[in-house]
Image: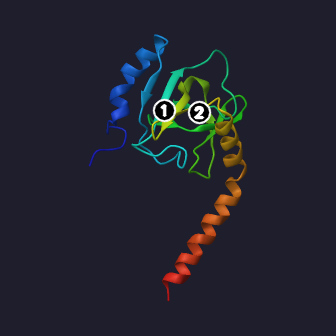
Amino acid sequence: MASSKSKKTELDLLMPMIREQLADGQNVTFTPSGVSMLPMLRPNRDTVTLSPLPKGRLKKYDLPLYRRDNGRYVLHRIVGVGETYTCLGDNHIGRETGVRHDQMIAVVTSFNRDGREIPVSALSYRVYCRFWYATRIVRRVWRAVRRRVRKLVGKR
């Protein structure tokens, strides 16, 4: 069985072309495949439009595509800005700290859901980001309660 480092993903294969288009100032649209950004982005169904990184630092709630030190590409929201970034997927509880600016590749400027393009500058999107991040603890407790109830009901 091949190790995860040697296993090439579709994004690994497309990344040279994506980087080239971004370097030329062009936007790139692709379909994310992971579940970490549910419910906002549905895997293999919704698309995102990436733009070249803006000048300077990214801001809280920006949605960058970055590459971890282990080589994996990640599309998670920035939830903290300092010397490094703190990122979090909408479907995750644990935050990823220590993400460096040099790991950033591009930033999402819009996403397409069911044929409707939603810019990240839209008020509805900005409200969603803040609400979803603010309620992460409540959602974590709710998931734990649901798991326990399902476990109890299943034992009968």
Look at the numbered disc 2 and give the secondary structure of its residue.
loop
**Which of the marked residues, 2 or 1, is nearer the chain's N terminus?**
1
Q: Find residue 104 and report its horizontal and vertical position in percent.
A: 55, 26
Disc 2 to disc 1, how far (Cα)?
10 Å
Residue at 36% from the left image edge and 31% from the top image edge: 12
Say the numbered circle drawn on residue 48.
Answer: 1
| Residue 151: % across, % down | 53, 78
> In the depicted view, which residue is nearer to us: 103 or 146?
146
Q: Are marks 2 and 1 in contact (CB under 8 Å)?
A: yes
Say which amino acid is labelled 1: Val
Give residue 40's position: percent from left, percent from top: 55, 44
Residue 125 shows in this picture: yes
**Outermost residue, top side:** 24
> What's the amino acid at mark 2?
Leu
Q: Nearer the viewer, residue 126 or 54?
A: 126
Q: Residue, x 47% and y 19% (percent of image)?
A: 27
Whether residue 68 appears in this view of the structure is no
User: In this rendering, is residue 97 above or below 140?
Assistant: above
Residue 144 in the image: state x and y as whole percent. 61, 68
Q: Is disc 1 surrounded by few (<14), some (14 to 19) or many (20+) residues within 10 Å? A: many
How many residues crowd mark 2 within 10 Å: few (<14), some (14–19), many (20+)?
Answer: many
Counting labels gives 2
Q: Is residue 3 above or below residue 20?
A: below
Residue 66 vs 146, above or below: the answer is above
Mark 2 vs mark 1: give the one in front.
Answer: 1
Instruction: Say which mark, if any, is on residue 72.
Output: none
Q: Is residue 147 above or below residue 90?
A: below
Residue extending farthest bottom: 156
Q: Residue at x 50, y 43 (%)?
A: 41
- Residue that carries the numbered disc 2 in the rendered image: 63
Q: Nearer the viewer, residue 20 or 49?
A: 49
Secondary structure found at label 1: strand
